[in-house]
Image (cartoon, grey):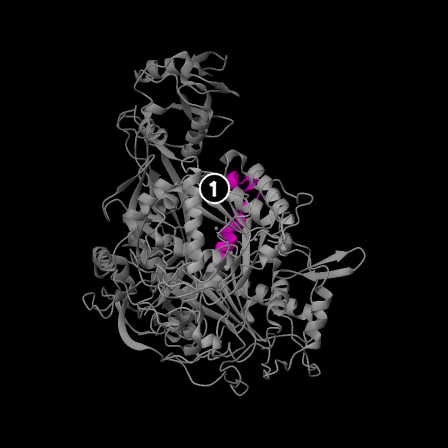
Amino acid sequence: MVRKKRTEQHGEGESSHPQQAGGSGGRGGGGQSMPPQQAAGGHPGGGREYQGRGAQQHPRVPELHQASQGSYQPGGQPIQAMTPGKPAEQGEASSSVSPLQAGSSQVQQQFEQLSVEEPSSQAIQPLPASSKSVRFPLRPGKGSTGTRCIVKANHFFAELPDKDLHQYDVSIVPEVTSRGVNRAVMAQLVKLYRESHLGRRLPAYDGRKSLYTAGPLPFTSKEFRITLVDEDDGTGAPRREREFKVVIKLAARVDLHHLGMFLQGRQADAPQEALQVLDIVLRELPTTRYSPVGRSFYSPHLGRRQPLGEGLESWRGFYQNMSSTAFIEPLPVIDFVTQLLNRDVTSRPLSDSDRVKASVFYLFPLCFASLSNIKKALRGVKVEVTHRGNMRRKYRISGLTSQATRELTFPVDERGTMKSVVEYFYETYGFVIQHTQWPCLQVGNQQRPNYLPMEVCKIVEGQRYSKRLNERQITALLKVTCQRPQERERDIVQTVHHNAYHADPYAQEFGIKIDERLASVEARVLPAPWLKYHDSGREKNCLPQVGQWNMMNKKMVNGGTVNNWFCINFSRNVQDGVARSFCSELAQMCHISGMSYNPEPVLPGISARPDQVEKALKTRYHDAMTAMSKSQQQKKEIDLLIVILPDNNGSLYGDLKRICETELGIVSQCCLTKHVFKMSKQYLANVALKINVKVGGRNTVLVDAISRRIPLVSDRPTIIFGADVTHPHPGEDSSPSIAAVVASQDWPEVTKYAGLVSAQAHRQELIQDLYKTWQDPSRGQITGGMIKELLISFRRSTGHKPLRIIFYRDGVSEGQFYQVLLYELDAIRKACASLEPDYQPPVTFVVVQKRHHTRLFANNHHDRNSVDRSGNILPGTVVDSKICHPTEFDFYLCSHAGIQGTSRPAHYHVLWDENNFTADELQSLTNNLCYTYARCTRSVSIVPPAYYAHLAAFRARFYMEPETSDSGSMTSGAAAGRGGMAAAGGRSTRSPTSNAAVRPLPVLKENVKKVMFYC
């Protein structure tokens, strides 16, 4: 089977996770969890020792030695194994990881004191400079845990051709950048010379420099002359002719033998050249039928086009999966602008008051912002003229004129005689311009601009809209793309039939046969884990059913404490009495759920204006601190701020979080007006879950965790990291990317995660602040970074230094695996070595991918035992064969229950494994962790540490200065006094040392870092 892996995603519906908690019952205070108890489904006894697990089952490159595993004694004393080499020096990067000052040397001494054995003389070798010498771990066998079943995947088996494939280099002169023109040239060449000079071969062309044939051409090098003639414009004028010189030269033979070896698991590396040939052959016909967008194809005829508003519409498309994306509607430009502004701009004559002069723009019936929006929306859009009969010449818009059409003039002869645009169109084309008060479209370059009135232009069909959609458009697109599994499967099969690969002349030429049935794949449904709640509740343990449960009769396993809190109401629709009642109900729910929550605020709630958020927050915060200083209580810190927000609050939410978390050092819980009025028990129970983890509590833990029965986690102190990088929206050309790293801070529970965030260069995928060094004038070279800070934090929280590291890395595409592994594993090792010379805990590095096209469907949609309520496959469904890598350690896991649309399984790919996980161990650990997500009583679609890292990175974008976060423009160079702990879509993996200066994020306050503030 030929598999084509992709990592892009289209705007399509997928199952979301509403934050449901259900009602709560019973009374009683919080408290600590009771001693661990045995529960059904686990192994009796304590943790296992894994000293005798043996070495890796696959060859490793000499340059990348595995860290050896020490054993963990009951007293917590580690036995270390390897001595790292000296950490390489790096330039200082911007970070919101604050340099560790007082206390860091003490922690380092504590790390060293924990070592009870002399360090080994074996040195950690430096990582290889080249990715070619790295081999990812081999699959340690297939998993066997769970209930076996069959699922269908949107993968299609292909029969490999038994053909002698040849590659030819193509040179077209004059060179053009348009693939469309290149394809037109080659299509004309094939039309003219296939039967003669090409030996009846039908070649496949990539639109650039490569041509492929199923068998040799009758020459090794040949030159052709090809003429392209423009279409007849109906005016009788001579048609434009363009001549091209095409040289086709034999480059290589393409051997498909290695592809067969790879698919049989007898070769490690995928033969990219052979896969590329098959891809180009199968894309040749769809490229002529549909509109290509990246790797996908879209058409208005694959499904009903749906309006999205403001001049956009959705088209259906396919790659391996069905999807939809936004295209610009092929409207007259005047109609497009009407939709964009959401009003008819042509219906009435203009009065003087309609015209506003700002800068050099005459804004006609528009305000300055409206004209700016029009200019932004139209720039780069291709239009065709409608005033010249059949001659529909096409132009690309470069901007709008700064003057109204009636005021535009241009020279018509060498003497500089000026003529107005209005006169020119009337005299030349007999066209009377109606909307003379509007600006003209500017096409061509700035030096020699051409002016076209809007009313003579129509938008060319088939242009994808690549800018950011607004919320209404996103909602409309999701409605279009959200399909039940059975409907999506049907559409996929229909599209494959429609493509008719059996009749595709290119597939026939190359001997490729595609099975038009979805692939049937063996799968297993992993069991849900038992969850532990507080012993004072009626239900002490809980076994989730089909990926969900509720808080009824349960109490949080570790209820947090909220002694000092107050409320600020920014919604003018919420009266003071309503706000007080809401806060009272919320306090009651937190108490019922197991928290220690003072029902009385430090100060009475107040109302404030949204445009005075900073003043209101800081004033009320200082008033609260003053009130507490006069009281008798010992703890004089604000535990929580409750904030009531308008439903549409613009930048208010982001400003509030930035001020609270980086300036005041308090955690906050925001509640929208609509929820305040409804005051539903379900909503309040859900908010209580979020508040509890924000103040340092735990909602639930795995029974297997507290009874020490999780393989390769429970046997010795283990830290689990999650990392993600979020990039600016399309169109924001200079905004920094944001990296976030979270790490578990409790063992053996592995439920609490501290988070750090960092700004880094625009669209940089490598996390730069994992490890860093800088020179201090008095102390010399200082080491720090996100990994080091989180390791120290783990030591402080648990009393142990981590003896095992599991690193879940989100957001990495397949083409970036090597670069990310080499750079980030090296940073992890250096961070460990900076704490203690011989400290090198074994690392397992797992990439988590959601941006892929694979979907899994139940073998029988009518079998209620094999689907959830939404018709999706059951939570816990894992696939590790057939559609996975032939030799490497990867698997698909659908860990969540669907709600609407078709569930997207997460793809986990192990890039490094010094802990020697078996398939069952890693799959079960990953699935079980998905039930510990703090914000809802549902299992989630990706492992929580990766999910938390995504949330933290998203939160940190609010910390940026307004001009950075909103418009994307940013001054280079760090702003003085804004040291941040804090990092970067195509994404770059260029060396971080080449980055331009990035303004650091503001530093998170120490007390905020320690809790799950991002929830």
Residue at 75%, 57% (x, y): give it: 775
Q: Which of 609 and 466 is in front in this view?
A: 609
Q: In this view, does 468 lie to the left or right of 84?
A: left
Amino acid type, residue under disc 1 in the picture: Gly
Mark 1: which secondary structure?
loop
SS assignment for the magenta stretch, majority: helix
**Residue 574 x %, y %:** 41, 38
Where is residue 179? Give x, y as percent: 39, 46
Q: Is residue 323 visible?
A: yes
Name the residue nearer the viewer: 629 or 779. Answer: 629
Classify 185 as above or below 863. Answer: above
- Residue identifier under label 1: 731
The foreground one among 696 and 55 is 696
The image quarter in which residue 824 lies? bottom right
Q: In this view, does 448 lie above or below 882?
A: above
Q: Residue furthest right?
A: 778
964 is within the stretch colored magenta: yes
Q: Residue at the spot x=33%, y=35% of the render?
A: 311
Q: Position of residue 832 (x, y in %)?
A: 64, 69
Was residue 960 drawn as part of the magenta stretch in this picture? yes
Quadrant containing the N terminus in the rendered view: bottom left
| Magenta span of residues | 950-969
* Disc 1 packing (10 Å; few <14; some 14–19; many ≥20): few
